[in-house]
Amino acid sequence: IKFILLVNKQGQTRLAQYYDWLTIEERVALEGEIIRKCLARNEHQCSFVEYRNYKCIYRRYASLFFIVGVDNKENELSVLEFIHALVETLDKYFENVCEL
């Protein structure tokens, strides 16, 4: 996993965690491009997007998009399972929270 982004429907980043070192400028550019690509897709398109040397897997839960960036060798379905487990864990731990 290279990064995890939580983004609302308006494109505002709510949480960003990077596991590779990137400058602030690179992070802002990366987030902007990936968020635009993911938000522009409709629900009938697949949840996998390739961007630069990353494979981005995303899933929408209510008003939040969970976006995970991985290298090109990673299995997409296992990342979707990871996103689902993350959402379930956050829901059990925090109970009834909104995006804010």
Image (cartoon, rainbow, N blue to C red):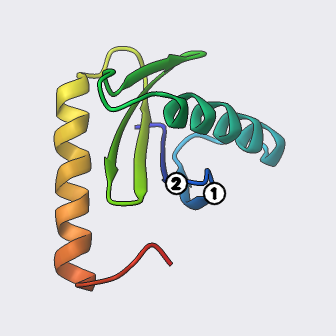
> What SS does tag 1 mark?
loop
Residue nearer the viewer, 81 or 45: 45
Query: Residue 93 falls in which quadrant of the image?
Result: bottom left
Task: Determine the residue located farthest toward the right in the rendered image.
Answer: 25
Q: Which residue is mark 2?
A: 7
The mark nearer the N terminus, 2 or 1, is 2
What amino acid does circle 1 point to? Gln
C-beta proximity under 8 Å, tags 2 and 1: yes
Measured from the top left, where is residue 88 in percent x and y?
17, 64
**Residue under the image location 48 percent in, 37 percent down:** 2
Location of residue 80 with respect to 76 vertically, above or below: below
What amino acid does circle 2 point to? Val
Location of residue 34 with respect to 97 vertically, above or below: above
Quadrant occupied by the N terminus: top left
Location of residue 34 with respect to 54 vertically, above or below: below
Q: Which residue is mark 1?
A: 12
> What SS does tag 2 mark?
strand
Q: Alpha-carbon neighbours of circle 2 within 10 Å: few (<14), some, or many (≥20)?
A: many
| C-alpha gap between disc 2 and disc 1 | 6 Å
Location of residue 35 with respect to 42 vertically, above or below: below
Residue nearer the viewer, 11 or 42: 42
Measured from the top left, where is residue 20 in percent x and y?
57, 40
Residue nearer the viewer, 72 or 33: 33
**Residue under the image location 24 percent in, 61 percent down:** 87
Measured from the top left, where is residue 35 in percent x and y?
59, 39
**Residue under the image location 65 percent in, 41 percent down:** 31
Measured from the top left, where is residue 18 in percent x and y?
55, 48
Q: Is residue 29 left or right of residue 63?
A: right
Q: Alpha-carbon neighbours of circle 1 within 10 Å: few (<14), some, or many (≥20)?
A: few
Residue nearer the viewer, 23 or 12: 12
**Residue under the image location 18 percent in, 32 percent down:** 78
